Image (tube, rainbow, N blue to C red):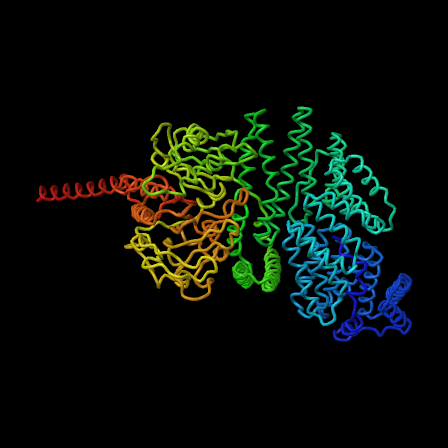
Amino acid sequence: MVTLVKALFRDIVWKGWLLLATWLICAYNTGDQPHPPPTLVAWYKKADHLFHLPNPTDATDSLALAAYREVIALGGKNGAAADSLLFHAHLNTGILLDVQTSYASAIRSYLQAQRIKQQHPQWSDSLLYEVAQHTGSAYYHLNNFDSASYFLLQAEALAQRFTRIPERERLYNDLGVLYYENGNYLQSRNYFTQALAIINKKPAKDATWVVNIENNVAAASYKLGQYQQAIAIYKTIYSQKAFTSQIFLNMGLAYKAMGNYQQALGWFHRVNTNTLPRVFNELAHTHLLLQHPDSTDYYLKRFAQSNSPNKAAPNSTYTGMYHLYRGDWLIQQQQYDAALQSLQQAIIVFSGHFNNTNVRANPAQFTGTFTSYRLFDALFKKATTFETLYKTTHSEAHLQTALDTYNSAIALLRFIEKSYDTDEAKLFLKNNNQQVYQNAVTVCLQLHALHPNKGYAQQAFVMAERNKASVMYSGVTEKGFRKLPGIDAGLVQQERNIKYNLARLSIRSDQTQDSAALVTLANEKAGFEIQLAQVQHALQQNSLYYQLKYQETYPRPDSLQQYLGRQQAVISFYATGNTLNVFVITRSGFKQTRIDSFSTIQQAITHWLTALQNPESGRRFKGAPWGRQLYRQLVQPLQALTAGATEWTIIPDNILYYLPFESLPAEAGDEPQTLLETTEISYQFSSRFIIAQAARKQSASTVIQTLAFAPFAEAGKPFPHPEYTFMQQLPASAEEIAHLPGLAFTNQQATKEQFLHHLQQYPVVHLATHAIADTGNSAASFIAFYPQSPQPTQDALYLEELYGLNMEGTQLVIISACETGHGQLVNSEGVLSLTRGFAYAGCASMVNSLWKADDAATAAILHQFQLYLQKGFTKAKALRQAKLDYLHSNALYKTPNYWAHLILTGDNQPLVQAVTWFRWLLVTGAVVAVLSGMIYYIKRRKKST
């Protein structure tokens, strides 16, 4: 991933520098300075001439460096040099030292140039751009990622202020490399793509520079799993005979990532080891994956003993990879103690701040630092090694150290996740790092088995919950942080506009087949995502915002208990391999159990859902055998743990996200009651939402005002979508929203425009329409409104548009459209559904549909649901009672297929202040007391007269 700075530095970055330098010296007001003596000017002219030779050599560079140093020495002795000359002398000295890979000395020169500029505030700040950019690049080469990030982001901020700054592509390339190091491969590719776009717009572009950035694009692509795309780029570059060793290395890395190890070895062996000795690391690792321990050892030693002039410095990333791969090899040899020492060295290298060689010590603080994703790899490997040691030695200390190391790895992972700029990047990171959470929970529960009263089960619960819906929770809470004092409202609006544009580009990409158009849209998207990162970095300059964004608080079971009533239970599931862990919190206690053979439960759920989602009129419900199995394996353990609690809040995981628990049998037998008939059930994304929503102020009124839509009540309509071209009539939808207090739109009035216009004016939104859930591409999911134009974006509300809405004043969304709770499942984040989109927008709770169900049954249930809400029922109780009414009605079909699809997710508070019997008793008692007093007073007056 090296950017080949030495090969490109002189030919690319500094073309046209003489013109720029002349402009910088002449264009700025440098104040009244002494005229520099002829000798000093002569030295500067000589240095400047040598520096700008069209074909410099090491010899001419050395002469230029000596001349610049003479300028600096003369200026320092007599103070006669113009500061502008000294500024450029220090800057160019740094560049020459950079070319020689003397990065520490180069940084000292750059910082001296910066100090000179700071002494002259009247000079344009644009002078600091190249200082910051080169300083950041030099710090990167020293593996000091914190300082590299600081200066490169400073350069990016200056580039935003001064739009005519040259060589912006080099900054974008460096930022791309930095994001790559951070594991944010999506943003990394964005920066590389934008750098390439800038170069391609130039009339005389440098082919070598183009090849270098294309190589970086390919590297980011293979990290994203787009192997064939990466290999195609590499082959194109190779055909041009450019950077052959670097391309050979990268081709090998791509094939290794694909699992094609023999092909990878073939490419690695073509690399020139004198120029790229780090290939020995990759040869060693590939042989390790092939179970060739002797070859692994051989190539690791070759890297360690390499005498190449370009040998990696002791603190370089490649040295860190050597220690990491050596640790892997030692583990394979069952030399665990030596492996831990090697892994500790890798941690020290990748951290940059942590230097404790004790293998039981771990870095603990990441806030405020730039973090390498490779550090996470090393910590995770170390934790698993301690786990392995525990299995062989049964030493409890090893198990505790494994847990401590997992905690460090998870803290790092959470920090990295928060530092990413887009949800897409966060979800990619999350989807590829579930094993660390699962291992940590498993270790916690192993320690709990050894020490049942030491709080390890509670710690396991917290570990699991900190991973649940973390991306959504961060998005929701950060919206609140935008309202902090001192936050620039213009930045917030700019962020909102960028997200809107990104949503529109995603929609257009989903509906475009033309490859050229897709490339254009991808480039536009990359540009907006870079702008989004820039805005978010600007927001983080507010210290309180930064502190709140990166703080980590998770509710423990005892902190949740205060929010629960006597009949309430929170049931949280967490899957680890073939085990389903169950945590139950009630007002009186906390319990935990494990259900083994989770794979058989998954199979039973799959069959159960198939039966639910495929009703056949006039035929018997076919899910009974699977229902009996799920009762034994799942429901019965829950009933035992909840100890009679009748109000359940379920936090699902894995396939359980798709399961309506109320449809399951509540007892054994051939015709059992369902959980609907015994238990009030609602769902939550994570325990953190329970506490957040308990703190949310919701004003209950006497009447619920509802904004309602039924666009297809009268007739089906052609729809402007490339795949879903017609929306069927929903004849019962008009009756579903009839007579609701508030504002209702039907048929041609029920447009997306009306929805967006009135959205923030009503506490309840009711959508009786069609929805499409795309499980392969969640961004393509949408809710349909009445079609008015040939453009689907005008009549469909897409998931990514939902994310950008402000629905903080909305207490409930009722979406009776089919499949609104369906979508792509992301590990522990949940289903990327339209329901999640409404929650992300700030809505407190949602009633949604898990599958396409009977229109009439849905309308009947939701009509009753609204009536019970008006009576002051909690949302879960209102929905349950509406379903029970349907079961007790004269409806022809009453199996779970017809009513179990509607579930409540989110806050369960009532929307109307109910008048309870106790309040009636108080009011009646007060009236009686007043009347009695009046009667007594009247009688006394009569007696007195």
Q: Position of residue 275 (x, y in %)?
A: 83, 52
Q: Where is residue 224 shown, x and y percent of the image? A: 64, 50
Question: 814 or 45: nearer the eye?
Answer: 814
Residue 918 in the figure: left or right of residue 769: left
Q: Quadrant of the C terminus?
A: top left
- All told, the count of numbered labels is 0
Residue 563 figure quarter: top left
Please give left or right for residue 648 compared with residue 505 in the image: left
Q: Is residue 737 left or right of residue 497?
A: left
Picture coordinates of residue 671 (x, y %)? 33, 31
Residue 531, placed above or below residue 777: below
Q: Is residue 945 above or below residue 246?
A: above
Residue under the image location 45 percent in, 64 percent down: 794
Residue 417 lies, in percent from the top left, at 60, 48
The reply to whether residue 912 is visible in this rendering is no
| Camera-side residue of 688 and 889 | 889
Q: Is residue 283 visible?
A: yes
Q: Which residue is found at the position 67% from the left and 25% from the top?
A: 395
Q: Residue at x 78, y 47 (%)?
A: 268
Q: In the rendered view, would you say 751 is above or below 401?
A: below
